Each structure stands twice: as C-alpha cells, then as structure tokens.
Amino acid sequence: MRVAVIDYGMGNVFNVERALQAIGCYVTITNDPLEIEAADAILLPGVGAFPQAMQSLSETGLIPLLKRSTQEKPFLGICLGMQLLFESSTEGIPTEGLGLIEGRVERMRAKRLPHVGWNSILRDEDVYFVHSYHVVTDPVHVIASADYMGEEVPAIVQKGLVTGMQFHPEKSGAFGLSLLKEWKEAVEREITTGH
Amino acid sequence: MLKRRIIPCLDVKDGRVVKGIEFVALRDIGDPVEIAKYYDASGADELVFLDITASTERRQTMLDVVSAVARKVFIPLTVGGGIRSLEDISSLLKAGADKVSLNTLAVESPDLIKRAAERFGSQCIVIAIDVKFEDGEYIVYTYGGKNRTELRAVDWAKQVTELGAGELLVTSMNQDGKQNGYDLTILELLREAVDIPIIASGGAGNANHVVDALEKVDAALLASILHDRKTTVEEVKHVCSEHNLPMRFVTTQTD
C-alpha cells in the first residue's frame, strides 16, 4: 500500500519513512496534492510546537484536502501530528487545530516534563514517548493510555478513519512496528472492502 | 509507568565498532548494524554511538553508519563525538539519528544549544557533561577530559537546561573505568538542580551499581561492563527489576 507522509517542515520524517518501509509500505514524502490524492493512506508526522506546525501546515495549502481525505481514506497522526487532529491547543499562543476529533491539547500537570522515555500502554507493552502536552478528549475516542506521574496520557486515539499515536511507533522497537503493521492491515482491509 | 533506561554505548572508528562484543555469535563483530540488532534484541532501550574517528572523512562515514543502523533498528539512536555545527546536527538527524550528544561544542558556544533546540527541538539535544571532583567541587571538563573549564557542574547543568537541552549525559571522570560504582553524589546534586532526564555514566562494574544509579536518575549508559562480558542488558534489567525499579521487557519479537 502507498502512504503519503505529509512534508511540511516539522521534524524528522525519515525515520517514519524507514519504519513504514520496514513493514512493506510504499512511502512518498510529499506536499503535492496529486500524490496525496493517489495514496491509500495519509500520515501526518510532527515534532515541535503546535502553533508553528499549524502555521506551516496552512502554508502548504493542504488543510482543506487533508480534512476532506479523512472522509475517504485512513489518516494517522503521530506525536505532534496526533495533537493537530484536535480542535485547539493552549501551547504558546492558543491555536486552532484540524478539528477532526473533538478535544483540546493542554500542557500536562506533571512536575517533571517532558514525559520522555518508555511507558506502557495496551497489553502492558512499552512505547517511546517525548512530549509535554497531551490531549483532553471524550474517553470514547481513547483506545489506549499511559500513566505518567499519576496523570493519564491518551496514547492512541481514534475516530472513524482518523487515528492518532502520541508516542513514536517508529522508535518503539518491535512492538512499535507491530502497531504500525496493525494500522497497515486495517488500511488494506479498508482498500479491499471499500466504504 | 515510565521505565528506567539501559543504554549501551558503542565506540565507532572509521565506520566500525571497536571494543565490540566478542562473545556474541555475530558474523562480524565490528559491524555496527549487527551489534545494534543484537543489543536491540537483548532489550537495550536506546543506543549511543560515539564517533572516535580522527580522520577527516569521519563525517560521511558516521552518516553511513547511522543510516544503515536506522534501517534495521527502531529504537532511539544518539550520536556523539566530533559534532561541530548546526549543519552536522542536521545531517545526522536526516541520516537517522534521533538525538545528538554535544560536549565541547556546547561549552565553547552555549548559544548553539539554544539555536539547535529551536531548530530541531529540545528532545534531540543531549548535553554530555564530563565531571571531575577536585578540591570539594564538581568541575566540568572538555576535549575528552583533557581540558579543565571554570564551570561548576550544577551551574552548567542549570544553564544548559535553560538553553533548551533535552537530556543530560553525566560522566564522572573520577569513576570512569574503575568499575567500582557511579559517583552518586553528583547524580543526586544534578537531580535536585534540573528536571530534564539524567543519564548516568562512568563507574559501573556490576548490575548492583546500575541499581544504585537508577534509584537516583532516569537512565544508565553502559560500555565496558557489556563489552567485557561482565554482565548483559538482560541481567542488568532483571536485577533492577528485583529492586523494584520499573524496567521495560520486550515481549514482541521482530519477525
């Protein structure tokens, strides 16, 4: 399957590309609307601050296309890319997000931030996190969470075809790759069964 | 619950791992990819590659190493040694490094920490601090321990944290190579001074020493005790776990 990794200048897209290739995806790192339309699924990466990321994303002119695509094909946001799926963030200047899932992004309360390192989610396996903000959303959208210093951290969120991972599956060893593979298999089912 | 981390450190010279793990049945004991795969499978939480190449071709060689490892091993990779500029950092991150470790450069141009953190994010900036205890003070050294600075370790740690460092890698020069335990006092002082993760280095001779360090800080960097077969990542993690330290155990196998 072909995945379009959105290139908008926020963070390292190459490790996401390598991980997707390792599980057998064809990857295009792109901001070309035609390539995005042609892909089976879209991946929104991201490292950095929310306001700059929304600014950069809106400069690509892709936002209307991305919003429309989520009705038709699977869309995965990773780390900051997951946070951008929500309605708004209080990081720096309060900023609107893509609004694909109801909820907002807020700074965590933990004394020691960032939340960095391996933390357990589903089936008690560990994934690699690096972030200081987390999403606040209806539990119905939360598939898995982690606990950091007594605070709940939504780790995997989902609504319709839109999925978000707060951690870095591309840096979470064999378990991280297995989560990407599960996503890939779900996308492939989507492709073959249609919608 | 957040886990404590065990991080093997590999010295790389001219694209080859030196002081590799000779006891392992690897086809090529100097091959960075083979060794990285071995440590990944044995439960290493991250890997640090330290470039000790002296030649001028070092840059491209290290980029090739990082890129080859990053295609096969999907845990965080840190590269240190010989980084001289923002461009060096950018190339390493593009090649597949997740973090870079800065030491002498950070002391000589602290402003660069800030610029690097702004450009690439704090999460990828590790500041390595070589510390020597002398005359009742913890003093920062540079140039691989050859050059004494006027900086006190605690002040420097606070300063780099404010400039945007994401983690600290603290090596006790008094303990390094002695294998009789970490300098727990400096780890404690730094833990009180800053909130960013601290990686302890220098002095581990057995798994119990690692327990002592991880009761104070977030992670332990291990080199010779792994390379000299004194212990393994698995054993260290089990001993830490017996002492109620939260550790990551890998249950999903690579296929």
Image (tube, rainbow, N blue to C red):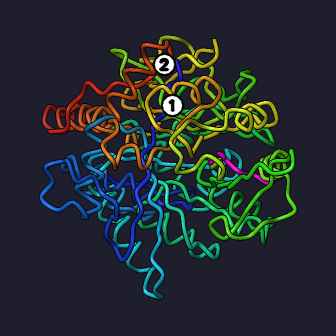
Identify the residue position indicated by label 1 in the image.
Answer: B210
Task: Check if mark 2 and mark 1 are on a common chain.
Answer: yes
Q: In front: B13, or A22?
A: B13
B100 shown above or below A123 = below
Residue B25, horizontal then vertical, whole percent:
13, 49
Identify the residue position indicated by label 2 in the image.
Answer: B246
A46 shown above or below A189 = below
Please tell me which residue is depicted at 51% across the width and 31% down the height of the picture.
B210
Residue A62 appearing in the image: yes
Residue A24 among those drawn in magenta:
no
Crowd around label 2: few <14 · some 14–19 · many ≥20 (10 Å) = some
* Quadrant of the snapshot with the C terminus of chain A: top left
Q: What element carries label 1?
A: helix
Residue B40, horizontal then vertical, whole percent:
30, 42
A173 shown above or below A101 = below
B220 shown above or below B238 = below
Image quadrant assignment for residue B141 = bottom right
Report the disc number at residue A175: none
